[in-house]
Amino acid sequence: MRKYLLILPAVVVLLVFLVIPYIDIIFISLHPAADDRPYGSGFTLRNYVQVLTDGYLVHQTAMTLWIGLVTTCATLVLGFPVAWFMAHSSARARAIQQGIVLMPLLVGIVVRSYGWTVILGNNGILNRLARDIGLTRSVLPLMYNSLGIVIALTHVFLPFMILPIFGTIRSLDPALFLAGRSLGASPAITMRRIILPLTMPGIQSGCVLVFILSVSAYVTPMLIGGMRVKTMPMTVVNTLIDAFQWPFGAAQALVLSAIGALIVLVFFRLTPLRWSR
Amino acid sequence: MNMPRLLPVLCCAVYFFLLAPILVVVLASFNAGAFLTFPPQGLSLRWYRTFFHNAVFLRAFIESMEIAVAATSISAVIGTMAALFSMRTTPALANIVRLGMTLPLVLPEVLTAIGLLFFFYAMGIGVHYSVALLVGHVLLTLPFIYINVSTSLRSFDPSWELAARSLGASPFVTFYRVTMPLMKSGLTSGCLFGFIVSFDAFSTSFLLKDVGTATLPIQLFDYLRLNFTPEAAAVSTFSIIVTFLIVIMTKTIFGNRFTK
């Protein structure tokens, strides 16, 4: 029985500081607002009705999920070839590449987003370059829009896509690809019928991680969007901290998380079926 | 393995994409001009001088260090204990423990922070005394310690501890001489990961910080909303250097400590 003492602190921490607070968020979202307290008494679904019927919030939720989906696709398209190449490099080249992929993770998210404002800004490196070589006279709209947010988020979360896929490719037998080829399958067919199904676990965890991270991202959309593009996490924080409307903010956060979780579930249901044949 | 010839080119482009914003920040910090232009107008360390005389940024840096060290230390104890439990218990239970311990990593950080904010207000503590901030950072760092320590203990056989005990070693000596050497690499990298995650954390700190205090990422974010001088680049470069120094120091100090 003494061994259970080892797990006790972890159970207490997770129960008290994770499970109870999450239940608390649900609890608060079902209460009416109050002027003198964080939330009033009595049960209500009004906060949810408000989130789901406010055209502006619905649009913003759709926008946030869309940015998440595009970012996930972009990281997958860029990340898979890199993971593949990394896994098939020599030991030394692989170590260097792993260093390059891990390095951005050592640099804070504020710093990296700031770097993108220097590159994408109206007076930034890319715009200056475009002007100098005479590509354009006007300012290229790279920042303060969803394009800039997707570019920066793709950069920030790319390592989370590359690393899990790299892990699964490494665990594959390199002969599998050759076997497919020697049996007459084209590289494209070998890739689609053999490699993709086998690397599916890595692709799935990479996609889910990147999707969750980019939908709930706060700093990057804030710095790159410059308040001109608003995503849901920004609105949630505004509602909670600046407007001090806890029940409404909690409902906003929960609606976004619920839709996000639903998309993840649908993704899990669809992906193995699609490639298993 | 025959690979499409374009693949290395594409990969180099992606690596450039990964490193570009970091290089830009580092180079911009040596700008001699008053505004953030690229390429820099002459080289200078003036923005580093400005930064080292800026008490607000220095206080934020110390705050970040304190929180990261405290949170990582607490997580190191709790996480290691949980990892030691997982390898002594049934696979089914160990699986549940693994799910629970990685939960803070898969749940959206903003949502967890909101939950903690509500919780500590309900407790009547609010964001005072940085308690909420510390708890938030413990949750952030815990999964990294647990994952790394339990990975390094994967091949561990609990009967080795029994063997040591039956040969007359005290529980403490058994732990120090048998268990510790096996998990030290996992514990070191877990603490390293945890420290860096905590040092760079934004959403958790932003929502849970005590009134009037700020960690370095928060202070930097506040500054960036109103200013565009290269001082922000100097602060960023400084925090990058600190992170890298900690990685290198940890590796050299703890790299071979328990090898005997």
Image (cartoon, coloured by chain):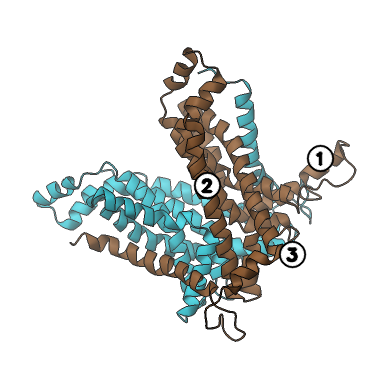
Chain colours: A brown, B cyan
Residue closest to the eye, A147 or B163: A147
Residue type at the position of mark 2: Val
Label 2, secondary structure: give it: helix
Q: Residue at x 59, y 21 (%)?
A: B4
**Which amino acid, by three-letter code, is at mark 3?**
Leu
Q: State if disc 1 and disc 2 touch (CB < 8 Å).
A: no
Q: Which residue is mark 2?
A: A266
Secondary structure category for the residue under label 3? helix
Residue at the location (18% across, 52% down)? B174
In the picture of the structure, the residue carrying the numbered disc 1 is A129
Taking the spot 42% from the left edge, 49% from the top edge, the residue there is: B250
Classify residue A61 as left or right of residue B111: right
The first of marks 2 and 1 along the sequence is 1
The residue at 22%/51% (across/down) is B88
> For mark 1, does the 10 Å Cα neighbourhood hold few (<14), some (14 to 19), or many (20 or more) residues?
few
Q: Position of residue A144 (x, y in %)?
A: 76, 54
